[in-house]
Amino acid sequence: MIALPTGTRIWIAAGVTDLRRGFTGLSAMVQTKLEQDPFSGHVFVFRGRRGHLLKVFWWNGQGLCLFAKKLDRISRKQQSLRTEIARAFSCAPTTTTDKTGASVRRQEA
């Protein structure tokens, strides 16, 4: 489990992300789509097309971290994504919208 500082937000990007992107591609997506600073210390979660692969992007104060997680099981309603993230970070989810009106889930640790 990753120990996050108090007040860290976990942003879950709505929709599908091309997970071939690395540090630069995901940080650009954080800046343009979510309009957030990738070096803020918040955690950004992206999911692949089929929903079984996640990438977690995080600035830990010393450098950028990029984690990948392959989920074993996916429910038909995609509820396992939310459950897996909450389990990994031990926090309660909330939902908000970005400036374009797209739904963005975030969780506070």
Image: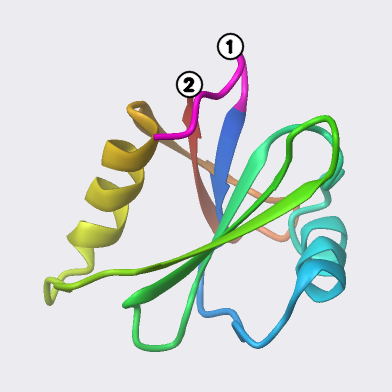
Q: Please tell me the numbered disc located at residue 104.
A: none
Say few, some or many: other residues with alpha carbon within 10 Å of mark 1 (under 14 / 14 to 19 / 20 or more): few
Q: Position of residue 32 (x, y in %)?
A: 86, 64
Q: Which residues are magenta?
A: 1-8
| Residue at disc 1, secondary structure | loop
Q: Position of residue 14 (x, y in %)?
A: 52, 64
Q: Please tell me the numbered disc located at residue 109.
A: 2
The answer to whether residue 6 is magenta is: yes
Q: Position of residue 30 (x, y in %)?
A: 78, 58
- 36 displayed left or right of 4: right
- 94 displayed left or right of 35: left
The residue drawn where x is 68% and y is 50% is 98
Name the residue tied to disc 1: 6
Residue type, numbered disc 2:
Ala
The residue drawn where x is 72% and y is 81% is 21
Q: Quadrant of residue 58?
A: top right
Q: Find the distance from the CA under tag 2 to the CA under tag 1.
A: 6 Å
Decide: marks 2, 1 in contact (CB < 8 A)?
A: yes
The answer to whether residue 32 is magenta is: no
